[in-house]
Image (cartoon, grey):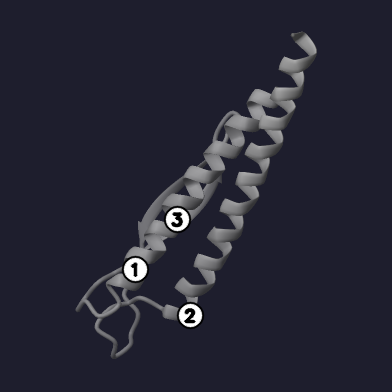
Amino acid sequence: MAIAALSSGVTGLNVAQRALGNSAHAIANIGTQGFQPAQATFAENAPAGTGVSISMRGQELLQVDAPSATNLAVETTNSLVYKAQFDLSAKVVQAADQNLGTLIDIKA
């Protein structure tokens, strides 16, 4: 059970990192003419409980006068959400690590 929790936590860390990187890429290209940011979409892997994956899809270009379709308010909010996801996944990894350490101490 602790190994599955550790695996889920690490998967969550990786997904949050990729999503945050995607958001940072969109913000970095806010001044690029015609840039269309990708949107992170989260879905549970099949079979259920085996982790989370992230897929990127292009957003439609917004009808605005800005050079790119990046919405700074949305990207800032998403960055805060992805940071919270990363922090939570790190806590899952810590808890799994402590449980594994306890199991190893009991067996030793």
Q: Which mark is residue 95?
A: none
Is label 1 in contact with label 3 (beta carbons under 8 Å)? no
User: Residue 85, percent across and down?
Assistant: 59, 54
Circle 3: residue type: Ala
Q: Which mark is residue 19?
A: 3
Measuring 62% from the left and 31% from the top, which residue is drawn there? 6
Mark 1: which secondary structure?
helix
Q: Is residue 85 left or right of residue 16?
A: right
Circle 1: residue type: Ala
Vertical relation: 108 (above or below) 80 = above
Determine the CA span between mark 2 and mark 3: 16 Å
Mark nearer the N terminus (2 vs 1): 1
Mark 2: few/some/many CA within 10 Å (<14, 14-19, 20+): few
Determine the CA span between mark 2 and mark 1: 12 Å
| Quadrant the N terminus occupies | top right
Vertical relation: 100 (above or below) 49 = above
Measuring 38% from the left and 53% from the top, which residue is drawn there? 56
Measuring 74% from the left and 8% from the top, which residue is drawn there? 108
User: Residue 54, percent across and down?
Assistant: 46, 47
- Residue named by callout 1: 26
